[in-house]
Image (cartoon, grey):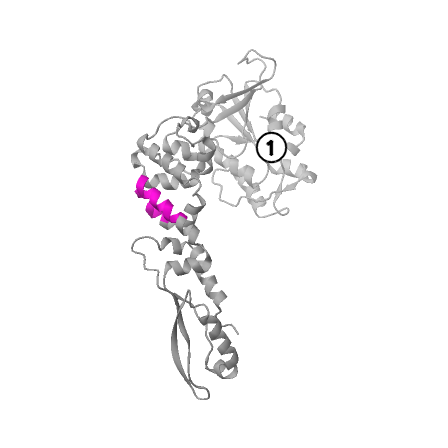
Amino acid sequence: MNWTTPADLKVQVQKLWDRGALLASMAEGSDLFPFKLKLKSPNSRELSDKFPDVREWISALTSGTKYFRIQWQTVNHRILGTNKIPAEIWINTLEDALDLIGKNKHAKQFKELVEQTTILQPGLVPWLYKRPLKALDLSEDWQLLLSLITWLCSHPRPMIYLRQINIPGIHTKLIEKHRGVLTELLDLVISEDTVDSTATGIRGFCRRYGFRDKPSRVRFRVLDPALKLIPTGSDQDITLTADSFSGLELPVSKIFITENEINFLAFPIVKDSIVIFGAGYGFDNLAAASWLNEKTIYYWGDIDTHGFAILNQLRIHFPDAQSILMDSHTLHEHRPLWGNEPKPETGNLTRLNLEENLLYDQLCRNHWGDNIRLEQERIRFNFLFNALENL
């Protein structure tokens, strides 16, 4: 038998809570209640064949009338005569629903959040009703978030670090923890002309709302001993902010970019050259250095789909960048050292040359095996020397 039980009815109400519908029904103008619940009842044949079970089922349902309202229907059965069975079950009020699943305390807490918000930031009240369970999750910090939002509305684009916000209880970790939801909330109440809409995502939070952000940096090594940028020994491993790097105008002809730190540190002497530690996707830290466009740029990444995707991304900023040691010969000369790429890239990379695109396509199609890769640190170092000699 699959007739609806009191436990099934409770599950239906719990699902309303899990969807946020019960708390949302507290909004003015909501018409959720009375709410009709789904009811699976005995059919005519079951009434005849299982009448004792039907009576027990009805008894179980009527015992729950403290929370439910049963609408009955009269059934005229040729054998059993006239009987009344449940036809519909309704839950009349929000209070009944909350009592049934034990959520009165949470509903009271949500009501308090709405009252606080109505006083400080009424423009956020619709968000509370749209995402009530998220609001409950934030209840411990909600008052602080409202204080921060109110302050930022009065101090648009303050151009200070998050650490410098002087509001009791507000600290950097709190803001960083809630950057995602703060973005949702701030966009609802803050003036549009104070928002940098080009800055998106968690990483773009500071720029979006006019806070100073930790500056991006460029780490590079001077590969020519004759070029002395700082009074130090033979190894010049230098890290600068992106702004400082953009203004260098270094007297070199070649720029190497490598993704592996040990390869960066071990990169050999090359006349008129520097090597930049790339560290994966993203080259915004180099984009402002317009003087790089006057140099010959070589990129050395892993021979896998992501290595070519990063090369493709580099060419957004530097279209003439060349690859080294990212070819079929290097790949097959190191076959015993192949590994597997966990989550391969599959997109269409439009900035690869013909040879690179062919190799990328073969990797995507698993031409030599499933998700193979050759990490750059596995390539024998004499291959690098030979590549540099052939430049």
**What residue appears at the point 35 percent right and 42 percent down from the top-left corner?**
116
The residue furthest right is: 336
Magenta span contains residue 121: yes
Q: Is 318 left or right of 24, judged from the image as shown?
A: right
The residue furthest top is: 231
Q: Is 379 left or right of 44, judged from the image as shown?
A: right
* Crowd tier of the residue under label 1, counting other residues whose Cα lies within 10 Å: few below 14, some 14–19, many 20 or above: many
Q: Nearer the viewer, residue 320 or 379?
A: 379
**What residue appears at the point 32 percent right and 39 percent down from the top-left corner?**
120
Question: The C terminus is located in which quarter?
Answer: top right
Q: Nearer the viewer, residue 283 or 130?
A: 130
Q: Is residue 381 above or below residue 26?
A: above
Residue 355 visible somewhere in the drawing = no
**What residue appears at the point 32 percent right and 37 percent down from the top-left corner?**
190
Dominant SS type (magenta)? helix
The residue furthest bottom is: 78
Q: Is residue 346 above or below residue 378?
A: below
Q: Position of residue 277 (x, y in %)?
A: 55, 27
**What residue appears at the point 36 percent right and 50 percent down from the top-left corner?**
129
Q: Is residue 150 above or below residue 5?
A: above
Residue 133 visible somewhere in the drawing = yes
Q: Picture quarter containing residue 183?
A: top left
Q: Which residues are magenta?
A: 109-128
Residue type marked 1: Leu
Magenta span contains residue 239: no
Q: Which element is circle 1 on?
A: loop
Q: Nearer the viewer, residue 272 or 122?
A: 122
Q: Nearer the viewer, residue 353 or 213?
A: 213
Q: Position of residue 276 (x, y in %)?
A: 54, 25
Q: Picture quarter containing residue 104?
A: bottom left
Q: Residue at label 1?
A: 325
Q: Position of residue 74 (x, y in %)?
A: 39, 80
